[in-house]
Structure formats: C-alpha cells, structure tokens
Amino acid sequence: MKRALVTGAASPIGAAIARQLAADGLHVILHAHANLERAKTLAGELRGAGQKAEAIGFDLSDAAASAAAVAAVLEAGPVQVLVHNAGTHADAPMAGMTAAQWHSVIDISLNGFFHVVQPLLLPMIGTRWGRIVAISSVSAIMGNRGQANYAAAKAGLTGAVRSLSLECAPRGVTANVVAPGVIDSPAVKAVMTKEQIAQLVPAKRAGRPEEVADLVSFLASDRASYISGQTISINGGMA
C-alpha cells in the first residue's frame, strides 16, 4: 500500500485531500501543528471507516523538528505521495509589514516545503514511483493587496516544483502545483459575502474543498504519470 503525507491536513482543503486519498486506497499520514487534535480526530474517523490513516504533529518552520518527524515516518518505509498544503497568513500592506510577518509566512509555505520534501526524495525515487503536489494560490498568479508575503511564498513553490520536476521525471516521480482560487471555508466566509464572491469569480461561486481534492487525487494517480512541472489553476475562471 502506498503511503501519502498531507501537510496542513487539519485545514478544510487539507482535510478534503486526506479524505480523498484515503478513499483512493492510500495510507494517509495527516500532518498538523496548531490543530493536531483536529487531524487526530479525522484520522480516527478514516480508520473507523476501514481506511488507513494516522496523524503526526510538528512545526514545518523548524528544520530540526521536521527532520526528526520525517525520519520517524520513514522508519515504516518510503512515502510515495506528498501533498504540501500547509500555509499561513499574516496579511498587511508591504509598507506596514513587519519582518516577522514576512518570515512567518515564507517559513511555513516555502521553507516548510523544503524541510518535508528533501528527506522524502531519495526513498521515493528508490521506488521509481512518486507524486509531489504543492498547493499554491491564485494570489501567487494574480497578486493580492496585503499579501505580498503570501503571494511570494506560494509563487516560490512554482519555481521549486518546476526545477524538481526536471530532476525527478526520469525516475518516475512527478511534481506539480495546484493553485486554488476562492474556496469555501470559515475563513473565506468571515471576510467575503456570496455577493462579493459572485463579483470576483466568473463562475459566481466559491469552489468546494472536495473539488480541489479531486484534482489532487488525479495528479497523485497513475493516470497523471505524464503530467509534471505544471501549475494547474482551480479558480472558477479567475485567471
């Protein structure tokens, strides 16, 4: 049975991805940090449904903690699917943004990608089959006021994944980016009305986390073996 690690699995998108990969027959490792109990609850639900799942907690911005956690995961064998969904916001106009706001967002989304992917690569390559999917954002493509840090972190994933895809393609490992737009979540509902979403999104609605999960599921499957180095938007026609 292939194993999948989903970072940020306690978020709405991360949880939907974990559920779908478990339904696809993978043993899913749900990563969380601040919301570890939520990830543990979801892992328990998946096991209760007869699926394979476990939860782990560590701080992706901490290189040493990440290395130790990933090493423990690898004791049970290689991870062949990695979905890097973890991210954070610290929105502010650049003129008023603090260094802490800048670095905290970069540390989770971009540095965290390196911290978790790098130690997984050689064991994954050794199996001659692997799937790496980084969750970016429409903000990385279009930009967004007050999100220079977030857009930079998510855009950085695109460059990293494109380079990684070139390194790994001969070894049966693909690497792609999924860039969601406005996706239904408590955080989105707190700042945008349905009317505002309809004005912003050509499809006139927010996307569903399950729709993102379906795309990730495809990219993590055998059917997507010839797709690598791509950034695929799922945003209702925004860009």
Image (cartoon, rainbow, N blue to C red):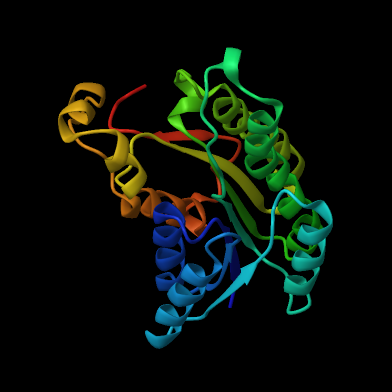
Identify whether 158 is placed above or below 49.
above
Q: Residue at x 40, y 64 (%)?
A: 20
Check the image and name the residue furthest to the top: 95
Of the pair 15 and 97, the residue shown nearer to us: 97
Left or right: 178, with 108 as reference point = left
Of the pair 168 and 3, the residue shown nearer to us: 3
Q: Residue at x 81, y 52 (%)?
A: 63
Identify whether 46 is placed above or below 183.
below
| x, y percent for residue 24 | 43, 69
Left or right: 29, with 181 as reference point = right
Of the 4 image quadrants, the one containing the C terminus is: top left
Q: Quadrant of residue 50?
A: bottom left
Left or right: 12, with 103 as reference point = left
Q: Residue at x 15, y 29 (%)?
A: 195
| x, y percent for residue 230 | 55, 34
| x, y percent for residue 154 | 58, 33
Q: Quadrant of residue 48?
A: bottom left
| x, y percent for residue 118 | 78, 51
Identify whether 104 is placed above or below 32.
above
